[in-house]
Image (tube, grey):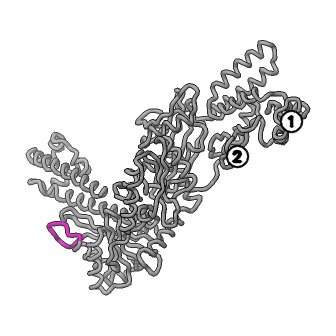
Amino acid sequence: MDMNKLERIKRELDQVPTLPGVYLWKDASGEVIYVGKAKQLRARMRQYVNFQDDRMKIPLLVEQIESFDYVVASSEHESLVLERNLINQYKPFFNADLKDDKSYPFIAITEGDVFPAIKYTREKHKSGTRYFGPYTDSRAARELVDIARRIVPICASSCADWRRMNRILAEVGYDERKLANEKTCFDCHVGLAPGACCGKIDPVRYAANVKRVERFLAGHHREFVDELTEDMQAAAAELDFEQAARLKQRIDIINGISSKQHVVTQHDLDADVIGIFREETIAGVQVLCVREGAVMNSVDFILNKGKDVPDQDLLHNFLLKYYGTASSIPREVVVRETPEDAEVMQAWLTERLDNAHGAKVRFATPQRGDRSNLLQMAETNAKHSLMRYKVRTNYEDKRVNEALLQLESALAMDKPPLRIECFDISTIHGKHSVASMVVFTNGRPDKKQYRRFKMRIQTDEANDFAMMAETMGRRYAPERMADERFGSKPDLIILDGGKPQLTAAMRMFGELGIDDIALAGLAKRDEELFVPWSDEGPVVLPSGSASLYLVKQVRDEAHRFAITFHRELRGKAMTASILDEVEGIGPKRKKALFKAFGSMKRLRAASLEELKASKAVPEAVAEDLFETLRGYNDEREMAIEDAAAELEA
């Protein structure tokens, strides 16, 4: 990090006001690389350059900052709206965004026209047009347009007569007499349009139809059934059976839609349920749109950030992106974790809801019940959406290839590391010490090549340095290098533990005369790679990069494999010695005990009364055995806890 540049930026931040607003970090080329909002601009921006923000991406972001800009807002709510607009405008690299650039289907109402029309579209959102969706299934969206027109007649933008009428209105304005001379369109003949093109309906009555269609598309179906039922009964009472039959057909259409939808609750739940499934550098999001207690629509998205950014960042950016274009705003948004800026976000969504009765939008984080079940379903579907995307786009192959090329460059190698071997030591105070070797071939685990080493060195305390040297000496001894069972020579060796392990490996390689295999020691805390050829400090792979993801995956697999072997050895050692510790139990009584209880597991679980009742040993010996088993069980529980703690570390 250029300290002179950092000090300059800190001085410039002294002039930033202590007001709410939006800040824009820029790189050396002047490109906006991050947009964020703040209650207090100066304090929030200082957190970056003082490294008081513990998000993983911050060091890399600050490294690239050359300048900044900011926009003062009158309130935090205004900052939120401005942040969304600027993210859409600049699409900064460090802000989470939709990964795939596909356009989603929407249903639109051209509200800017005298006689608004309905249409299916994938167009970028235009002013004067209201959009409903997005929809995952394009065919379902098209069918919904047709269904809406059969329930409430409205013009379609695809109708040639509607387009001709619009040209007339643009030239001479609305003139009922002018339109009355026009011919009736086909849609009007079959009951799909109300006859705006031929003067059969005026703009005021037509606007009422438009409002009803919008209510229907927003998922409020029950009110239409009630209204149409009243109209049908009135028509039947007046002996207008033809009109009653048409209304009955519309009621059946709405009921048919409801029967196909998954009813999730008996209550009038009006909510969007947002499920997120994250991997290291990518995430899937599923939105379930629940209206009147039923899932009306579901849509999935892929985000270009995953575990490389905090949950709050990912959720915040998705909410801005999604609700910046969605027109159907629910009264409730169900999420796993409440956003940090929940109050401001709720105020923004409430403003967009624009409910005549003053309804407000709120966030819910359910722990049980219908909402919790829905959230679980959304998260499961988000996972499957991500898996489908990865298969469809061949994402894994591309990510692995990118990772290998990045490692080749970062570690100054002659070629990509197609075979990577990683080692980890597992021990507790020098007892039952083991080393694991995992192999990744072409960026993927090659489990047939995994090997385990039981340490021969005897120490009273853990000595990872000596153990790593022993492991290197045994694995890369000439006879092992010539053994086909150990596979080909690796391109890269990664040693979990950092610089001490690297030093041990280098010393052993010097003794063995090996100088053509790349070595790197991985420090656990900061994911830094120490290499033999650099005296300027470790290699730091970019946060969120494919190479860092691969290195962490290799390291975690080595750690898992070592912990498993270590736990296995401890278990065997305890089992083998436990009966020998009890005075009075020899080979015959061991055999009798296993015959009575069938397994060591059942023997450990036996009560004192059960041990005595088995008659396998005398009662006095049974009492000693019970006390020994109880101590063993306590020690085993502690060992499991220790192993879990190691795995988490």
Label 1 crowd (10 A; few <14 / some 14-19 / many >=20): some
Question: Which region is colored magenta?
Answer: 455-464
> Residue 52 location in percent, x, y?
34, 55
Task: Return the residue at label 1.
Answer: 185
Badge 1 marks a residue whose secondary structure is loop
Badge 2 marks a residue whose secondary structure is strand
Judge whether residue 505 is colored magenta.
Answer: no
Viewer-closest of 26 and 608: 26
| Residue 250: image tag | none
**Residue 228 placement: quadrant:** top right
Would residue 181 be found to the left or right of residue 490 on screen?
Answer: right
Label 2 crowd (10 A; few <14 / some 14-19 / many >=20): some
Q: CA distance from mark 2 to mark 1?
A: 22 Å
Outermost residue, front direction? 15
> Residue 260 location in percent, x, y?
63, 35
Which residue shows up at 56% across the image and 38% down it?
289
> Residue 143 location in percent, x, y?
71, 40
Amino acid type of the residue tagged 1 in the rendering: Cys
Where does the N terminus fall, quadrant-wise? bottom left
Judge whether residue 460 is colored magenta.
Answer: yes
Q: Earlier in the sequence, mark 2 or mark 1?
A: 2
Task: Return the residue at label 2.
Answer: 121
The secondary structure making up most of the magenta span is loop
Amino acid type of the residue tagged 2 in the rendering: Thr
